[in-house]
Image (cartoon, rainbow, N blue to C red):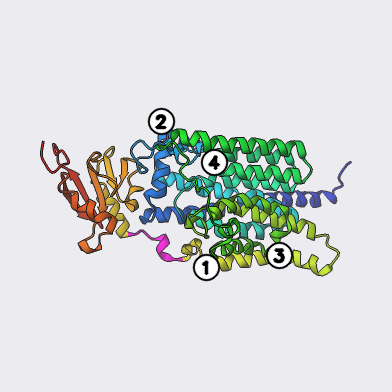
């Protein structure tokens, strides 16, 4: 069919407009990447990252980059991290780290992966709610508290899972069953709790009458999860056990899952960004495995909204919201249809309001964009320790050294057996300020052959005297 001269400009404008719409999710991802990177790198440069967990993950990726087993000295001498958590997909970060050997590399990669996860969510949102509405929901997703908390707490392997899961969820919402499975299967290589999430995805397929595919996915996930937690992790673990086994409890299961109240609070915070509309979609069931293991655990750190534990849930609640809106667009009630058109604007308002109390608010603080003289002085003092040295460092100093030294955690070390050549600790001018867990170790430094080299920039550096046997005597 030919196009007349009069029609040609209209067709050209239409094509140009279409192309611009297609680029919007990527523009948003770039903006989120810049925001996430600024926040996380600023924290590191201000000595706000730690050995637990940035230093530990850097030691693992550094080992992979040199074709070695992922041993983390911060966890203990010779501690193989696959005996702690199962995250072999971290190997993918090795090439980037080999080129740029720095903890900042891990932070930038994490920012990139989390930002990229906004692309499938935003593209799907634009198909459901239109260009403006979809972009608004993409912004709300990028500002969601789960992603912000992940960016603001060092580095974690969950950043590898978020974009994979986002793509899988969108394919589920679009009824692209096989594509959803292909995106979801690598999740079992990210962390040992995610086979349960993959099994839930298989259950969703069964719910949608995709019986053969769903049963195959469930079987694969269950077998994989049992092998990982029952065989693989214990094989690498020093105690030959899965270290996060919570075991049975005399407590009523419902009571254990639902109390204390912080668990209900976390659930409400999960639904708030979607104005509670996500509950209308069965896709929300895919959040159940993550919430179940967290709430079942006796570790209270898993229950709340802090740290990285809710990052994997953000794609679930936003894709569930969009899935619910798809059904509501054709609702017979005109008021309901109007409400669905206003939802994107409300999600942005809620996200911006929440951000005033979340980590990204720091981007409006002038101090975030300025160098920190105190942090610079700390790093300058740490330069006293030569590259390749073996060091025992406090948690907040460890991540500043793991790129160029072998780092153990102080005050666990030095001890009677393992005595690193160097010790880097926070300089407490008043001995009464030394934390209780560090006092005995600090007092033992002279007897173990360590002498003060320098104390500047809030750091005290000690060096072990040559020939000292570590038992209070010279050899």
Residue 368, magenta (yes or no): yes
In terms of depth relative to the viewer, which is nearer, 294 or 345?
Answer: 294
Question: Cα distance, mark 2 to mark 1?
Answer: 43 Å
* Segment tinted magenta in the rendering: 365-372
- Say whether residue 261 is left or right of residue 237: right
What kind of element bears circle 3?
helix
Upstream in the sequence, badge 4 or badge 3? 4
In terms of depth relative to the viewer, which is nearer, 343 or 239?
Answer: 239
Upstream in the sequence, badge 2 or badge 4? 2
Q: Are marks 2 and 4 in contact (CB under 8 Å)?
A: no
The residue pinned by badge 3 equals 343
Residue 110's tag is none
What kind of element bears circle 2?
loop
**Marker count (numbered):** 4
Q: Are marks 2 and 1 in contact (CB under 8 Å)?
A: no
Question: Cα distance, mark 4 to mark 3?
Answer: 33 Å
Upstream in the sequence, badge 2 or badge 1? 2
The residue pinned by badge 2 equals 68
In terms of depth relative to the viewer, which is nearer, 351 or 214?
Answer: 214
Q: Which residue: 59% across, 55% down?
A: 253
Quadrant the C terminus occupies: top left
The residue pinned by badge 4 equals 190
């Amino acid at each position: 069919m030919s196009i007349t001269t009069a029609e040609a400009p209209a067709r050209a404008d239409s094509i140009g407009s279409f192309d611009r719409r297609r680029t919007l999710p990527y523009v948003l991802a770039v903006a989120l990447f810049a925001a996430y990177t600024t926040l996380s790198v600023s924290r590191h440069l201000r000595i706000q990252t730690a050995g637990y967990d940035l230093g530990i993950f850097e030691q693992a990726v550094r080992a992979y980059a040199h074709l070695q087993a992922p041993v983390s000295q911060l966890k203990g001498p010779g501690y193989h991290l696959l005996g702690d958590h199962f995250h072999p997909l971290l190997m993918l970060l090795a090439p980037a780290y080999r080129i740029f050997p720095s903890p900042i590399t891990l932070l930038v990669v994490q920012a990139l992966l989390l930002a990229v996860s906004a692309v499938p969510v935003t593209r799907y949102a634009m198909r459901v709610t239109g260009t403006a509405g979809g972009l608004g929901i993409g912004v709300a997703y990028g500002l969601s508290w789960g992603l912000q908390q992940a960016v603001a707490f060092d580095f974690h392997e969950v950043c590898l899972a978020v974009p994979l899961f986002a793509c899988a969820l969108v394919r589920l919402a679009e009824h692209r069953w096989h594509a959803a499975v292909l995106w979801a299967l690598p999740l079992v290589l990210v962390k040992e709790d995610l086979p349960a999430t993959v099994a839930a995805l298989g259950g969703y397929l069964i719910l949608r009458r995709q019986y053969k595919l769903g049963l195959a996915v469930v079987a694969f996930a269950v077998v994989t999860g049992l092998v990982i937690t029952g065989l693989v992790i214990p094989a690498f673990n020093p105690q030959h056990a899965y270290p996060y086994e919570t075991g049975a409890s005399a407590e009523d299961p419902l009571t254990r899952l639902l109390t204390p109240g912080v668990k209900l609070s976390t659930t409400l915070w999960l639904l708030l960004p979607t104005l509670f509309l996500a509950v209308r979609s069965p896709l929300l069931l895919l959040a159940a495995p993550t919430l179940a293991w967290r709430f079942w655990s006796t570790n209270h750190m898993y229950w709340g909204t802090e740290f990285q534990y809710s990052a994997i849930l953000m794609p679930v609640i936003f894709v569930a919201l969009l899935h619910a809106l798809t059904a509501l667009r054709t609702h017979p009630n005109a008021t309901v249809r109007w409400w669905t058109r206003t939802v994107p604007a409300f999600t942005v308002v809620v996200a911006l309001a929440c951000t005033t109390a979340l980590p990204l608010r720091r981007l409006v603080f002038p101090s975030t964009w300025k160098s920190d003289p105190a942090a610079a002085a700390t790093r300058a003092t740490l330069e006293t320790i030569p590259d390749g040295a073996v060091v025992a460092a406090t948690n907040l100093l460890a991540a500043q050294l793991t790129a160029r030294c072998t780092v153990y955690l102080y005050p666990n070390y030095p001890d009677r057996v393992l005595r690193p050549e160097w010790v880097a600790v926070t300089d407490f001018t008043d001995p009464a300020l030394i934390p209780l867990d560090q006092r005995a170790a600090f007092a033992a430094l002279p007897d173990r052959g360590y002498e003060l080299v320098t104390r500047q920039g809030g750091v005290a550096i000690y060096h072990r005297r040559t020939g000292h046997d570590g038992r209070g005597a010279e050899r």
